[in-house]
Amino acid sequence: MIHETKNLNYNPTQYHENNRTPKVDYVANQMVQTNQHELNAFFYAGFGRRFFSYIIDLLVLWGFSQMILNPIYALTGINEWKLWINYFSVDHILDALIYFSYFVFMTKYFQQTIGKMILGISVYNVSITPLNWSDVLFREWIGRIISNILLGLPYLFVIFTPKHIGVHDYFADTVVVKNKYLKYIKENEALLRDKSSDNPYNNEVMY
């Protein structure tokens, strides 16, 4: 018989009527949730992998600027054109358009940027389905603007959340997964949905 466990807070619905012995399904559910946190750390891309993929993407964008944009600027001088203030110069506007377009279109059509391809990770909806346009725009446009305005600090949320969710992921309900475990992640999410619908003690949504 399983006896009272210290880390279980008492709740009448968690125990049999005539004693303090926890119901087996409640204890099993606590074990499942503990194991789920371990699986999340294993399946979902952490801060280090995501950080280095972003560095690779910045290098890709820098290379494009050096090889394509800079020669155009040198030939035409359009980078000297300004709208009101220096910050709204043509080169700054083009750089911003290319930056956001790169992340938006690569994520929408490939679920990953070049950096993510190299590091073996992809972006999906929390239900592990391909992203729609609203997901992508909230994540790669609005979310990135907010994160960049706040000096990148919201990206640090990835370190502390169970599924390594960043603030921009919260906006779009997205996760970044390790490609080699994608099949198992889909099976795991389907199993969790089934357990959530069948088990009255499992009401948590873990991000």
Image (cartoon, rainbow, N blue to C red):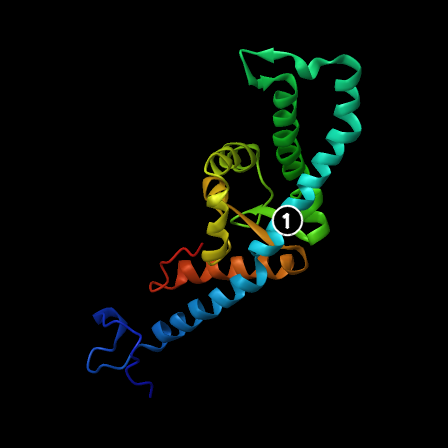
Direction from residue 128 to residue 200 in the image, left or right: left
The front one of 118 and 187 is 118
Direction from residue 173 to residue 49 in the image, left or right: right
**At which x and y percent is residue 36?**
48, 66
User: Residue 140 sits in which quadrant?
Assistant: top right
Q: Amino acid at mark 1?
A: Ser
Secondary element at tag 1:
strand
The front one of 130 and 141 is 141
Residue 45 visible somewhere in the drawing = no
Q: Is residue 32 above or below residue 121?
A: below
User: Residue 4 sits in which quadrant?
Assistant: bottom left
Residue named by callout 1: 122
Residue lying at 72% horizontally and 50% vertically, measured from the top left: 118
Near mark 1 (Cα within 10 A), the count class, few <14, some 14-19 or many ≥20, is: many
Residue lying at 80% horizontally and 15% vertically, measured from the top left: 75
Residue extending farthest to the left is: 18
Q: Quadrant of the C terminus?
A: bottom left
**At which x and y percent is residue 136?**
56, 36
The front one of 189 and 58 is 58
The front one of 61 and 171 is 61
Residue lying at 64% horizontally and 17% vertically, measured from the top left: 90
Q: Is residue 12 above or below residue 179?
A: below
**At which x and y percent is residue 80?**
67, 14
Residue lying at 33% horizontally and 88% vertically, measured from the top left: 1
Direction from residue 198 to residue 83 in the image, left or right: right
